[in-house]
Image (spheres, rainbow, N blue to C red):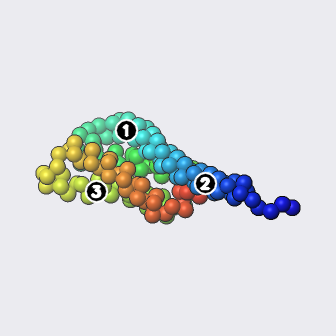
Amino acid sequence: MRAAGRFDTLCGMTDTTSLRSRSYLRFAGHYVEMVVAMFVGMFVLAPVWSFAAPGLVARDDVGALVMAFDMTVGMVLWMRVRRHAWRPIVEMSVAMVAPFVVLLVPYWLGAVSGETLMMAGHTLMFATMLLAMLLRPAEYLHHRH
């Protein structure tokens, strides 16, 4: 048996760095997967709404909520496929819808336009999703699928 030398120490650091890098890549990959699932939900459900309730999304506020709902459905389904528990799924759903709900007040008061509602809502949605992930890092860094 040989004594631990400089090479072993460097290899140990590399192994730790490698594990950390893989965890962060898994975290980022999980975020990207959820974004893709959101877009799938939006593109799959949008035609359903057009067929089932023509004109439903003609109003900007209703359109924003329907789009947030569609994206949330896609994300929820993907998180269930990835075997996440319901609590983080609900937290992520709230994180996705909350920006739109909050922005409805200034929209209804005439302080922001429909375009601002949609743009700011989506921008804030991505930020609040990241925040939800950062508040529960073990769920997204080490979650086994």
Name the residue tied to disc 2.
Answer: 17
Are there few (<14), some (14-19), or many (20+) residues within 10 Å of tag 3?
A: some
**Three-letter code for the amino acid on which mark 2 is drawn:** Thr
Res 143 quadrant in image: bottom right
Q: Amino acid at mark 1?
A: Ala
Counting residues from the start of the chain, the first of labels 1 and 3 encountered is 1
Left-right relation of 63 to 4: left
State how far apart marks 3 and 2 are (Cα).
41 Å
Nearer the viewer's eye, disc 1 or disc 3? 3
Q: Residue at point 26% right, 58% down?
A: 102
Q: Give me the C-alpha separation between circle 2 and circle 1.
A: 43 Å
Label 1 Cα neighbours within 10 Å, binned few <14 / some 14-19 / many ≥20: some
| Secondary structure under the numbered disc 2 in the rendered image | helix
Q: Residue furthest right?
A: 1
Circle nearer the N terminus (3, 2): 2
> Residue type at mark 3?
Val
Mark 3 sits on what residue?
101
Circles 1 and 3 in contact, beta carbons < 8 Å: no
